[in-house]
Amino acid sequence: MEDSSKKDLSKRKAEMSIRFSEFELPPMQDILVIGRRAPIGPEAVRRMVDALAPEQYELITFENGPVEAVAVRTALFNWISRNVLLDNILEEALKINIEKTLLKVKMDLTISIFKEVDI
């Protein structure tokens, strides 16, 4: 009888969340951060992007650190300066153990303007 009461007290459950989305070409979002020891390197990403979305992404490489490269949708540079975008993406990516990872980044950018005018 003791065994059955122990089983009742030790139930195990897992929560599962499943998200489905349409497959996109190229299979990345606005930005792809490539860790220095990621399974796919910058040259493979360059070939994929050139084949699937020519002239839509720029691959930016880094000499040092855990991030080897970043592929950025070039249209983003029309909205925000290159340095501001890269500085912020790298700042956040470096908070994650990125060195062995490919990190797909979706960026929602909203520009707010407030002006005072004389009436």
Image (cartoon, rainbow, N blue to C red):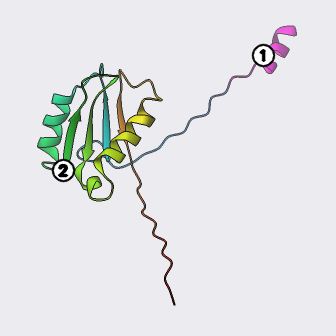
Secondary structure that dominates the magenta span: helix
Q: Which residues are magenta?
A: 1-12
Q: Residue at x 47, y 29 (%)?
A: 95
| Front-most of residues 118 and 9 | 118
Residue 56 badge: 2
Helix, strand or loop status at disc 2: loop
| Front-most of residues 7 and 115 | 115
Q: Residue at x 81, y 19 (%)?
A: 9
Residue 16 is inside the magenta segment: no
Residue 35: quarter of image: top left
* Above-or-below relation of 108 to 96: below
Callout 2 crowding tier (Cα within 10 Å): few <14, some 14–19, many ≥20: some
* Left or right of residue 2, residue 114 in this image: left
Tell which residue pokes out farthest to the front in this image.
118
Q: Which residue is mark 1?
A: 7
> Please, what is the three-letter code of the amino acid marked with disc 2?
Gln
Place of residue 79 in the rendered image (x, y in percent of width and height, measured from the top left): 32, 59
